């Protein structure tokens, strides 16, 4: 390993050295993780499993967005599914005398 006289280095040289050390640490950790993963995958394969089966990393399906049930009377781009908090335009329409069925999408 190289011996550095840190006192003799300029600020820019120290910052470059700091950046190089951080990069070296990161790549070392990445190599160690990759090596560990390869060992675990190999062991799982030897036992007749995939690593995903053992650790349960199969992707979970997410819920599809709810279909809109209500539409703004003047701006059809504004819709609401009927779930969650009522949008302000819906509340204002109800206060103006409209009913939810008036705003429903047929």
Image: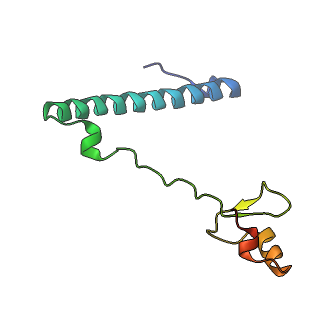
* Residue 55 percent coordinates (x, y): 28, 45
Q: Quadrant of the C terminus?
A: bottom right
**Which is more toward the observer, 29 or 37?**
37
**Total count of labels:** 0
Q: Going by the image, does 11 lie left or right of 76?
A: left
Q: Residue at x 71, y 73 (%)?
A: 101
Please indicate whether residue 1 sits to the left or right of residue 35 in the image: right
Taking depth in this image into account, of 30 and 60 the one nearest to the observer is 60
Residue that appears at 53% across and 22% down: 4
- Residue 79 vertical position relative to residue 21 in the rendered view, above or below: below
Q: Residue at x 58, y 30 (%)?
A: 18
From the top left corner, tell me how far across and down residue 75 is, in percent. 83, 58
Q: Position of residue 23 (x, y in %)?
A: 52, 28
Q: Is residue 10 visible?
A: no
Q: Residue furthest front?
A: 106
Residue located farthest toward the top when viewing the structure as drawn: 2
Viewer-proximal residue among 83 and 106? 106
Q: Is residue 10 left or right of residue 43?
A: right
| Residue closer to the observer: 76 or 2 | 76
Protein image colouring: rainbow
**Residue for point 35% across, 29% down:** 34
């Amino acid at each position: 390993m190289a011996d550095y006289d840190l006192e003799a280095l300029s600020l820019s040289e120290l910052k470059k050295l700091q950046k190089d050390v951080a990069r070296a640490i990161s790549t070392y950790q990445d190599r160690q993780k990759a090596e560990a993963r390869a060992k675990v995958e190999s062991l799982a394969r030897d036992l007749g499993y995939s690593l995903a089966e053992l650790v349960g990393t199969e992707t979970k399906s997410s819920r599809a967005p709810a279909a809109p049930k209500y539409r703004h009377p003047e701006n059809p781009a504004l819709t609401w599914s009927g779930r969650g908090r009522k949008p302000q335009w819906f509340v204002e329409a109800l206060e103006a005398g409209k009913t939810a069925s008036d705003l429903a999408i047929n």
